[in-house]
Amino acid sequence: MANPDTVIKNALWKDKYCDLYIAKGKVLELVESAETNPGSHQEATTYDANGALLLPGLIDAHVHLRDPGQEHKEDIDSGLDAAASGGFSHVMAMANTVPVNDQAQITEYILNKANKSHPCGPLLHPIGALTKNLQGKELAPLKELAQTGCIAFSNDGIPIQDTSILRSGLEYSSSTGLKVIDHCEDPYLGMDAVINEGKQSSQLGLKGQPTLAESIHVARNILISEYLDIPIHIAHVSCRESVELLANAKSRGVRVTAETCPHYLVWDDSRVEEFDSLAKVNPPLRGSDDVQALRQAVREKNIDILATDHAPHADHEKDAPIAQASPGISGLDTALGLSWYLVRERIFSLEDIVRSWSHNPAEIFNIQNNRFRKNDPADFILFNPGETWKVTPENMCSKGKNTPCLGRELPGRIKYHFVNGNLIFQERS
C-alpha cells in the first residue's frame, strides 16, 4: 500500500470497526481495525472516529442557492456552508436565479464563485435552464451550457405546457449526454393552490392542489420518455398516483428516474392545520396515504433518490398569512437528521439511505462517488447516530431558517466531513 497522508481510525462500517487510508484525495484501503498496525504511517494526519458511522458523502440533486440575484435568501457561500454541515459533498443547483442560468456567463459566475468560496468543497454542479428565461417557449443553448459545466437541464418550478418543447428538450439534452429534470404540475389544476386538496383544505378554507395536478404530468413524461427511449428524471414526487405510474413504467423498462424529499416522507398535510406557513411547499404536503406510498416506493426502489428541494427564504417571505407566504422548505441543514429519524423508526434501512442519498444520484447524473474502493474519491462523513441536536436559527448554516423542524430535536450529528480527502467540516465543540 502506498503511503497515506490521512488515516481515519475506528470508524464503524458494516457493523465492523475499520480504518480508512487516504492519499492525494483518493481511497487507498478500508480494512478492519484489528488488521492495521497502529505504529505505522506516522507521517499521516490521523483522526479517531471513536466508533462514528462511516458514510459516503451525500449528493443533493435539487437545491436552490438563489445566487445570483436573490442573495437575501441565500448565496453560494452560505448554501455551501449548509451543504458541508449537512453532509453533502455535491449539490446540484437549479437554474431559477436572477438572471436565469440560461447562458454560459451565468454558469461561469456560479462555478467561479463556488470555487472561490469553497475551493475544497462541497462541489457545486449547476443545472442549466431547459428553456430561455424558463418561459417554456424556446430552448436555451443547451450545448453551450453543457460545455460550460452544467450537469443537467430543468425548467425548475415552471412546468412546460408545450409538449413539443419538452420533446425537443429531451432530444437535444440527450445529444449532450445530460438528463432533463422535470417539475410535474399541471398549471391549471394547481393554479393558486396553497395546500393539498383534501380534508385539511376544506376545513381551513384554502385552495387545494389535487394530486392529479402532479400525476397527470408524470404520466405524460413517462409516455414521452418511452416513445423517444430517452431518460427523464421526475422531481420531488409527492403522491401515490405518481408512485404507481413510476412502478408500472419501470416494470416496462422505461428509462425514468424519480426523487422525493424528506418532508414528503415525514409530514402529511395535517402539518398545516394551524395555517403554518413553514410547512407550505410546492408540491404540497399530501395525505397520510401518500406518505406511506412514498416510503414504500423508496424501499422498493421505484423512487430512485432523495433530494432536499432546498428552498431558502428570508423571514419576511414566510412570516405572512399562509396564502401569501412563499412556498418552500430550507432543507440542507436538516435532511440527514430527518432521514435518520426514518432509520431510527425502522422505516428505512441504512442501505436505503446510502443508496438514495449517494450511490444512485451519482449514477443518474454521472458524478464520481465513493464506495470505499481503491481510488474512489475520498468523500465521506463520520456520523454519530446516537446524538441529537436542536434545530434553531443559530444552529443552521443556511440563510433560510424556513423549516417545520425549528425548535425540534433531530437525531444524529456529523463529526467530520471530508471531500477529496480534505476536511471541510468538523463538529463544533
Image (tube, helix red, strand yellow):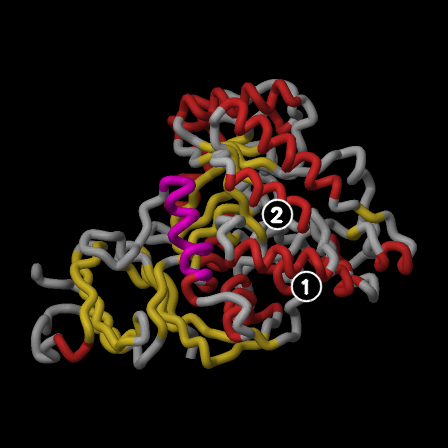
Q: Does the segment drawn in magenta span residue 361?
A: yes
Q: What amino acid type should be assigned to the residue bearing mark 2?
A: Val
Where is residue 152 shown, x and y percent of the image? 47, 34
- Identify which residue is drawn at 72% across, 62% down: 288
* Placement of 308 over or under 158, stated as above or below: below
Q: Quadrant of the C terminus?
A: bottom left
The residue under label 1 is which amino acid type? Trp
Image quarter (top left, top right, bottom left or bottom right) of the N terminus: bottom left
Location of residue 167 in the rendering, given as x and y in whole percent from the top left corner: 57, 21
Which image quarter: residue 342? bottom right
User: Residue shown at 21%/55% (left/top)?
Assistant: 26
Identify the disc placed on residue 243: 2
Let me know if residue 262 appears in the view.
Answer: yes
- Which of 63 and 173 lies nearest the eye of the viewer? 173
Span shown in magenta: 352-366
Of the numbered discs 1 and 2, the one sitting upstream in the chain is: 2
Residue at figure coordinates x 43%, y 36% from the top left: 151
Residue 406, position as x, y percentages in the image: 65, 70
Magenta span dominant secondary structure = helix
Image position of 80 (left or right of 99): left
